Image: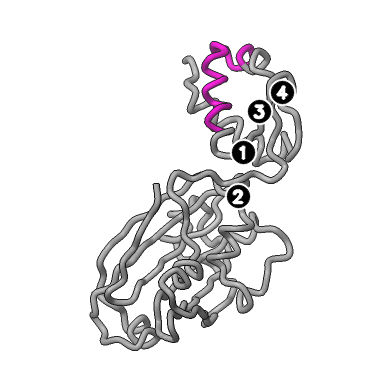
Amino acid sequence: MTLGWEEIRAEVLRRIRARDWPPGALIPGEEALAEEFGVARATVNRALTALAEAGVLERRKRAGTRVAALPVRRARLEIPVIRLDVLGRGLTYDFRLLADREEAAPVPVTARLGLPEGARLRYLETLHLAGGRPFVLETRWLNPAVLPDPAPDFAAVSANEWLVTHVPLVSGDIAFTAEPASSREAEVMGIAPGTALLVAERTTQGTLGPVTLARLAHAPGHRVTMTF
């Protein structure tokens, strides 16, 4: 069966994640890869171009293609930094770290991230404030295996802002729903249980594997603006 460019892209990404081709390494040329995979050079070109657009590879004429030393996320949908969102509304920003622990993640979480059942992840619960009032309750599962070491003190810098600025992302997905506030959300945000909340749930994948599953429950009346 002839491989398509998507399969070649996946294999190149696998080799990068496995450190067969470490950051900064020069990878084989298009002709060599086309011969290895038994496809046309144009097919390889399309796969490498897609990875270059994602910030995983750096391509230069007559200099070859290298694995990016510090990949830059070039997502079509930018992940917002909550602090900047609040300041942009003319309000003061603050946040409180309510929980930070490492534990075996629930099966629905590992399944969403494509990790083995029972994988130990870092769980964070953060309340973001705007003008001193609850703005977003963020609950997040982090995969320590793909994070720079050492990770920061998330009581000093929010995981939302640190991940956006320090961890290169390749892909992800996001879903928006309207959900009634749970008893925990009601308690933390100072609202009645069952109050309708705008909830955004997002997973992200980095060059080394799955990074995080985040759930952001926005206070009533929240308006989300996204730039494409």
In this image, 137 relative to 101: left or right? left
Q: Is residue 90 above or below residue 68?
A: below
Tell me, yes or no, whether the two marked residues, 1 and 2, touch with CB atoms within 8 Å. yes
Please tell me which residue is depicted at 23% across the width and 80% down the height of the picture: 194
Measured in 3D between alpha carbons, the distance from the residue under mark 2 to the one under mark 3, in whole angstroms, is: 18 Å
Tell me, yes or no, whether the two marked residues, 3 and 4, touch with CB atoms within 8 Å. yes
Q: Amino acid at mark 3?
A: Arg
Measured in 3D between alpha carbons, the distance from the residue under mark 1 to the one under mark 4, in whole angstroms, is: 14 Å
Residue 165 percent across, percent down from the top left:
60, 58
Q: Amino acid at mark 1?
A: Val
Please tell me which residue is depicted at 52% across the width and 53% down the height of the picture: 115
Q: Amino acid at mark 4?
A: Gly
Lower sequence index among marks 2 and 3: 3
Q: Is residue 94 above or below residue 27?
A: below
Please tell me which residue is depicted at 28% across the width and 62% down the height of the picture: 177
* Residue highlighted by disc 3: 59
Secondary structure type for disc 3: strand
State which region is magenta: 34-51
Residue 45 falls in which quadrant of the image? top right
Secondary structure type for disc 2: loop
Measured in 3D between alpha carbons, the distance from the residue under mark 1 to the one under mark 3, in whole angstroms, is: 10 Å
* Residue highlighted by disc 1: 56
Please tell me which residue is depicted at 46% across the width and 49% down the height of the picture: 172
Secondary structure type for disc 4: strand
Residue 91 percent across, percent down from the top left:
44, 78
* Residue highlighted by disc 4: 64
